[in-house]
Every structure is written in C-alpha cells, then in structure tokens.
Image: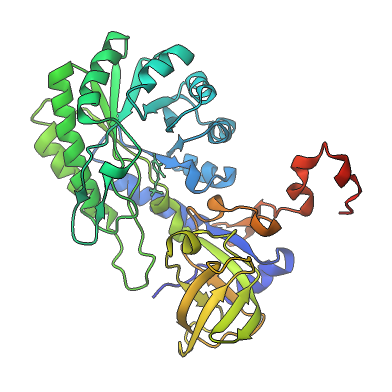
Amino acid sequence: MKKPFVTLEQLKEITKKYPTPFHIYDEKGIRENARRLKEAFAWNSGFKEYFAVKATPNPFILKILQEEGCGADCSSMTELMLSEAIGFSGNDIMFSSNATPAEEFIKAREMNGTINLDDFTHIDFLEKVAGIPETISCRYNPGGVFKISTDIMDNPGEAKFGFTKEQMVEGFKILKSKGVKNFGIHSFLASNTVSNEYYPTLARVLFELAVELKEKTGADIKFINLSGGIGIPYMPDQEPNDIMVIGEGVRKTFEEVLVPAGMGEVSIFTELGRYMLAPYGHLVATAIHEKHIHKEYIGLDASAVNLMRPAMYGAYHHITVMGKEDGPCDHKYDITGSLCENNDKFAVDRMLPKIDMGDFLVIHDTGAHGFAMGYNYNGKLRSSELLLKEDGSVQLIRRAETPKDYFATFDFCDILKNIKY
Ligand SMILES: *Cc1c(COP(=O)(O)O)cnc(C)c1O
C-alpha cells in the first residue's frame, strides 16, 4: 500500500500557512534514496549520479542532491544557469541536449561542463561556435527495437536522439583528430523501467560498444553514462526496483566485458531524474466540488497544469484521501481539475473512500516530472513548492505564482497598466 509521507494533522498545520494546491517534497526520503544509489555503485570508484535537472528544477532540491554528492544533468540555458548559481561546475555538470542552440554550447563550455553530443553534425557545429573540449561524450542510438521483457519495450529506431553505430566510430576518429583526450558514451533506451534488468542490459550494449570503439578508434574511454530510465512503481501493487540488485547486475557485466578488455578503470555515470525524486513528492489538493451527472466527479483546486502526466500519458498516480486511509474504497470517481479540457482528470473510474468537500487529497509520486511540466493554460497559476525537512519543519521552497507573475511579460504594455493586483 502506498502511504503518504505527511499525516492529516501535519497537512492541517501546513495549510494554515500555505493553502492548497502545493507540491511537497520529503527531504529524508530524498537523502536516504540518494545514499542507497551511491552504495549500489560503490564498487565503481568513479561513479557519479548527475541528477536530471529537468525533473525537478528547484534550487533547494538541487542543493540537497549536491550535498549527497550528485552532479547536475542540464538540457537548456536556464538549467545551466540554475546549476551554476548553486555551485555546480566542471565535472559536476553534464550537458545532455539535442537540437542545441549555439549559445547553450557556449555556456556549457564556459562552465567547463561535460558536453554530451546528440548528433554527428554537432561536432562541426560545436567546433565553430565554442571549440572542441578535451573531454566529450557522444549519445548512442542503436536503432531498431529495445526489448527486455514483454512489458519493457522501447523503440530507439523512432527516437530523435543520438548517433548511429557508424557515426559513433567516425565521430570518435574525428574528435580524436581534433584533440579530444577523454571520451564518454551515453545512451537512454527506455523510460520508467520497473525492472532490475534495464541497466544491466543497457550496460552490456554500451560496454560492448566501448570495447569496439576503443579497438577501432584508439579513443580513451573514461566514462559510460547509463543516463535515466530507472522507474518507480506508480501502481500500488507494482514490485519496486531493487537498486542494490541493479548495481550488482551492472558490476557483473562490467567484470565480464570491460575488465577483460583492459577497461577496468572506466567510470559509470547515471542521470536519473524520476528514480531520485518521484516518490518523494506529493501534490496536495482540496476537494472543492462534487458533481453527479452520468458519472460521479470530484473537482479539486489543482488541475493538469500542476501535474500533466495523467492528462498527457494517461499515467496512473495513486491517490490517498487523507484521514480515510483505512476506509473502504466503495465509491467510483473521476477526480478532475478545472481546465476547459476533458483530459484534465487525475483519475478515471478510481475506487476511493467517500470524499467530502474540504477533504485533502494526496496525489502520489509527483516529485519528478510533476511541477516541472507545469504550464499556465486557462490562466492558471503555478503552485508553491514546500519541503518537509528532516526535523519535521516545513520550508517554502517556491512561492505560488500571483496574477502579477502571470502578466509579467506584458510589463511594457500600457493597456494592462490599470490591472489592480
Ligand atoms: C529526461 C532525461 C533523464 C532523466 O530521465 P528519468 O526518466 O527521469 O530518469 C536523463 N537523461 C536525459 C538525457 C534525459 O533527457
């Protein structure tokens, strides 16, 4: 069963100061999980997790991860700026972008971050706009279909990312001739995998590629980046990943493939987002309307702008009606927001305890790709973000937007001068 990391009593206290809706994060859970990941890969002396900033771009969260030894994986100018402000630099920064604007390559070079090139033609582009650094990584796309089991399948052949095998070989030769000394390999082949097999399977693909690249190009491969993709059990009956088993699976493959090839010094990097944060965030909302037509609806003060995954992917997010955790789930509801869009539903035909107006609903697993995917459609404002600290206190880590924020990009516009805030 999924249990919220806050109690009803805590929420009653918190909402006196910070009204719903808000996202709240669990510092203790984040730290403990980051430590487990580190332990699982402790066998590799160069191991480093570069947190995918896009998953939860909040400076307070990034600071916690930095304290736990993580670096930052950035994909845009503002993510680079955010990471720089927090004090990530050089080896702490991975820049994994695609269709990259020139100014972002320039910024990444200025920060001395590690650039992970998405495309063969970016070699020339990077050289022209920012010069070729001594350390560089290239993203691999094997094409075809990537399959581990019946439920884990993805389609790299349809994905816009990465170099083909031939381009990797050719690219490494060119980069070497242009002075690159340290090479890395990156690949992201399946998303949200709830399986201990994903990383070991991907690792074998990349380790074998590394051996081949070393033989064919003489490149000195310093790191292999397994990227993101380790999933979390959004459904309450799903068996979670065991990170220790995953770390051990990668180690075995490392011993089998890289060590015999004389590549036992290669560092393993990860760029996890979801696995690092998703379970340690809740979206907390209040039931403000009930509607009885052809179905039973509960309307919340949150909507898809606060959490897009259900609307966008039909993703399941578990819901707890606070104070009714042990009640029978004998009511069937659609749980909705207030957008003028019928996909604005956090749950469809969900069996839950009877919901009364004013009940707090905790929507689980929103710590990654939650707030971050928010938007302003229907003139909705972004919510606040709160941090439940290890000592039990609550800190505001992002204030809620106000109408003034919403209209800020019209600050030059006389017509809106008379808006009363
Ligand atoms: C999104 C992304 C990640 C993180 O993915 P998760 O599914 O959150 O682990 C890592 N690397 C790259 C390049 C990404 O685009």
- Residue located 78% across and 53% down the image: 403
Q: Is residue 186 above or below residue 365?
A: above
Is residue 255 shown left or right of residue 21? left
Quadrant in which residue 148 is drawn? bottom left
Judged from the image, the quadrant occupied by ligand 1 is top left
Quadrant in which residue 2 is drawn? bottom left
Image quarter of the C terminus: bottom right
Pinpoint residue 197: horizontal percent, then vertical percent: 20, 53
- Residue located 41% across and 52% down the image: 274
State whether residue 263 appears in this view.
no
Pinpoint residue 392: horizontal percent, then vertical percent: 58, 62
Is residue 124 shown left or right of residue 354? left
Color style of the picture: rainbow
- Residue located 48% across and 83% down the image: 352
Pinpoint residue 111: horizontal percent, then vertical percent: 51, 22
Of residues 396 and 366, the one nearer the viewer is 366
Is residue 274 shown left or right of residue 381? left
Quadrant in which residue 171 is drawn? top left
Image quarter of the N terminus: bottom left
Pinpoint residue 393: horizontal percent, then vertical percent: 62, 60
Question: How many labels sit on residues?
Answer: 0
Of residues 102 and 58, the one nearer the viewer is 102
Of residues 313 and 19, the one nearer the viewer is 313
Q: Is residue 153 above or below residue 116?
A: below
State whether residue 305 appears in this view.
yes
